[in-house]
Image (spheres, rainbow, N blue to C red):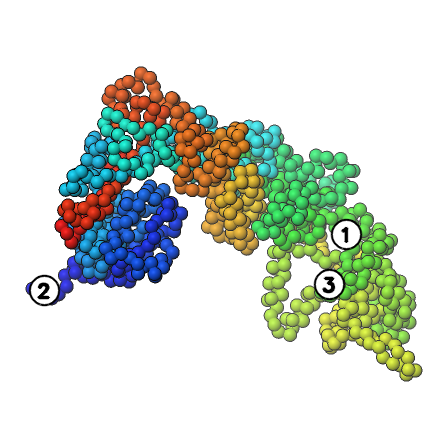
Amino acid sequence: TDFTTASECERFISKIEEVLNDWKLIGISSGKPLEKGVYTTGIWEEKSDEISFADFKFSITHHYLVQEPSDKDGREELVEDALPLPMQDLLCMNNDFPPRAHCLVRWYGLREFVVIAPAANNDAVLSESKCNLLLSSVSIALGNTGCQVPLFVQIHHKWRRMYVGECQGPGVRTDFEMVHLRKVPNQYTHLSGLLDIFKTKIGCPLTPLPPVSMTIRLTYVLQDWQQYVWPQQPPDIDALVGGEVGGLEFGKLPFGACEDPISELHLATTWPYLMEGIIVENDVYSDLDPVQAPQWSVRVRKADNPQCLLGDFLTEFFKLCRRKESTDEILGRSAFEEEGKEVADITHALSKLTEPAPVPIHKLSVTNMVHSAKKKIRKHRGVDESPLNNEVLNTILLFLFPDAAEKLMDGFESRTSTSAGNNLPPENEDYNLFSQFKSAPSDSLTYKLALCLCMINFYHGGVKGVAHLWQEFVLEMRYRWENNYLIPGLANGPPDLRCCLLHQKLQMLNCCIERKKARDEGKRGSVSDRSPSGASGDPGKGAEQAGDNLDKEKEVGKSWDSWSDSEEEFFECLSDTEDFKGNGQENGKKGGAKEGNKETVNLKPEGRLHPHGKLMLLHPGEPLYIPITQEPAPMTEDLLEEQSEVLAKLGTSAEGAHLRARMQSACLLSDMESFKAANPGCCLEDFVRWYSPRDYIEEEVIDEKGNVVIKGELSARMKIPSNMWVEAWETAKPVPARRQKRLFDDTREAEKVLHYLAVQKPADLARHLLPCIIHAAVLKVKEEEALEDISSVKKIIKQIISHSSKVLRFPNPEDKKLEEIIAQIMSVEAIIARARSLKAKFGVEKCENKEEKEDLQRFVNCLLEQPEVSVVGAGRGPAGSIIHKLFVSAQRVSVVPPLDEELRRSGSPEERRLNTGAASDFPPPTGREVILRTTVPRPAPYSKPLPQRMYSVLTKEDFRLVGAFSADTTFF
């Protein structure tokens, strides 16, 4: 055998040493004494590596509290025989029972340690020989490197949390040991038994023994809130029809938990800094009365995922997004099928068209078809089978369309306002949230529709109810389009691209209704009042004529009164005479101004809005008139996207660029034709002076007679041969706006919108409206938080808004990101519900003393945000007395008199002891923790006095003893 070859054990030791060196854990550890509570408030960090013993893999992890680096001067002052820092930490009493920390921190009070544990979760070091081998390796590695950081090895199964370890210093060593039992021996259920085992383990040869200091904590759990009923009543679904649903109306989201979100209250009563002999506790008597404990601290256990109304609403609505069915499939295809007798053979379709109509033509309108379809739906489905009953449906439709209730036909038709009254002022930050979420304003029809669909999805037939309401909504849109009734709850003007696409579509439909209505009434509506300053991207013209427009808007040419909706009025081509006149005018322009004037004298001006006021035509010298022009077509974002794709596909060739310019100049051509009709004898220079003043350059020059005159000419870009403006001017004929082909064909656009709405599946609808629902949920959460004023919730709401605005701004956001937003909203709802639950339990609102009320409010807020909160004044403070009463009332209910005596006789010593005296106000403690500390010379009387510590925890399920026993390795 070659003894020079390193064994597996030696390789393992060297790997441990290598990792300790890498992490710079070699040499004397130094640090300041720990401040109180630093284990809870400080930052804990860890770093890991992997090592292996033969083929068995271990993970090695360094856990440490982040501290400010200590001064170099302080390091030089270290006493030579000072104890290593971990040994000093064993005796420190400032951080007993930290609420959030690694179990070894709670058991030993260490600020820094290294753990070696099996890398795989199902691996375990079970045999004693393997355990000893690992401990030996650790001991050698610590000795070789001079590392003073404690090193632990995890043994047995991981769920048992069993560790053994060692810490070495100059001439001293501490062994960390542990006992874990399922059943506790009776002698260790009380303090005197634990003191006996501690003294026996130390085996100190001195008499009398140095005093042992004790810290004791008893934890009591309150589960039954007998005197307190959870205030959140589940909504009364039957009352929904009347508008109210347990405090819930259409257009409002519900809020709050359906069950108590606080499941348990844990009260920890602590006796710190006791010396042995002050307290007596054995198997027959106990001095430990929780009411008299000097320190009380409380933590609450929150119910796991409490059922909350707002969260349920959002989750159920989000599930709609994953449905595949169309509206027809959900409501039944047969609904739209005719009976056999009514179905005509398709081959007779053409002959039917040529036959004389036996019915008046007005009966063939789409509205009548829709009503006949609805009759067939009812006939096939039966009234009772309808997903929404008429009462609920009518309530919703009146909520969505309030104008329908006040509608007296005459009064309704004269109605011009299209917005349903703002709930919030437009400058309000919450009101403008829609632009961040790409949803819709909170007073808009789209927003209300989203809320109604959300409620129907939850309470009234789920997806079928949604499909039914949507079908009714689309029919209402069709009815309004055909009868020229504006849609309420939508802002005037073109589609707002900051809103969701569905909202834009409804705004587009409103634009169509507005224009159709203006023509049908024979009045000049907003359809024709355009100030075309935006057409060329030059603001000059708009600025020049803005004032004139305001004064003279009402002076409309009589020709507008004859406008009607009939498409025949829009001439695709001009009559021969007009064509001749137009050509004559153009030839005049080309041949020279003088000839042109002769040709155009006979042209009658048409479509004038009002005189410009400042400009005159260059050649005839007559006043320049601003023409009535067509409004450019409003567009939704999907139309803009389509248009940009078409233009992009034309490519970069000269032909493509020319074609693209022509497509984009439809509005320019229309304006030129209107200008020519209003100003017979005009030339391109006249048009440019009005339309784009910057492209007409004027200079002062001296003529032949020596006079200074102003001479103007077109800009360089206008003089480029065959440029778009010149081409358009030559093509333009003098046609007033009312006889031009419409730039915006409202009939076609309205039908496109109605078709788009009709083919939306419930899933598409849910996707469109989800931003509105998230927007509404955020507003609801903000409103509820304002009542509670919880600082942590304010921060989370800001994060939700920031996160949502990033996710919802883009089309088709990922489901995972949407789920994250919904989860964040649900977490906020749960926090607010917990705050209300705690407020009710601690009677914050009932408290009459102002100072006490503020203290209780602060206490409740701390309970929500901190893992454990100390009770000011312990059992005698305002919060302490309330907690005491809660326990007393719970105990009264739980104690049944006949069984009481029997329990006292037959129960364990623990229960017998705690059922006597003042402790009967409280149940038996769920957990008992005891820390015993002392400093004694060990193992010999002349050894150095070293810290010894034992921690004991006793619960119903298990019993654990954790010891750190130090020994002198120099004098033994």
Who's the residue at 85% across and 55% down the image? 552
How much space separates mark 1 and mark 2, taking CA atoms?
A: 102 Å
Q: Residue 527: x, y in percent?
A: 76, 53
545, 449: nearer the viewer: 545
Question: What is the quadrant of residue 268 in the picture?
Answer: top left
328, 93: nearer the viewer: 93
Q: Circle 3 sits in a helix, a strand or a loop, which is it?
A: loop
Residue type at mark 3? Answer: Ala
Quick one: label 2 or label 3, which is nearer the N terminus? 2
Residue that extends furthest to the top in the rendered view of this protein: 898
Which residue matches tag 3?
535
Residue type at mark 2? Answer: Phe
Residue that extends furthest to the bottom in the rendered view of this protein: 704
How much space separates mark 1 and mark 3, taking CA atoms?
A: 17 Å
In the image, residue 22 sits, relative to residue 772, either above or below, namely below
Who's the residue at 32% across and 33% down the image? 218
Who's the residue at 82% across and 69% down the image? 686
Q: Residue 44: x, y in percent?
A: 36, 51
Count neighbours of disc 3 (C-alpha within 10 A) and say few if under 14, some if 14 to 19, many if 20 or more: some
How much space separates mark 2 and mark 3, taking CA atoms?
A: 95 Å
Label disc, if present, on residue 3 of the rendered structure: 2
820, 913: nearer the viewer: 913
Visible residue check, residue 285: yes
Visible residue check, residue 175: no
515 horizontally vs 805: left or right: right
Which residue matches tag 1?
526
Residue type at mark 1? Answer: Ser
Tag 2 near tag 3, CB within 8 Å? no
877 horizontally vs 963: left or right: right
Q: Residue 796: x, y in percent?
A: 50, 47
Q: Circle 1 sits in a helix, a strand or a loop, which is it?
A: helix
Quick one: label 1 or label 3, which is nearer the N terminus? 1
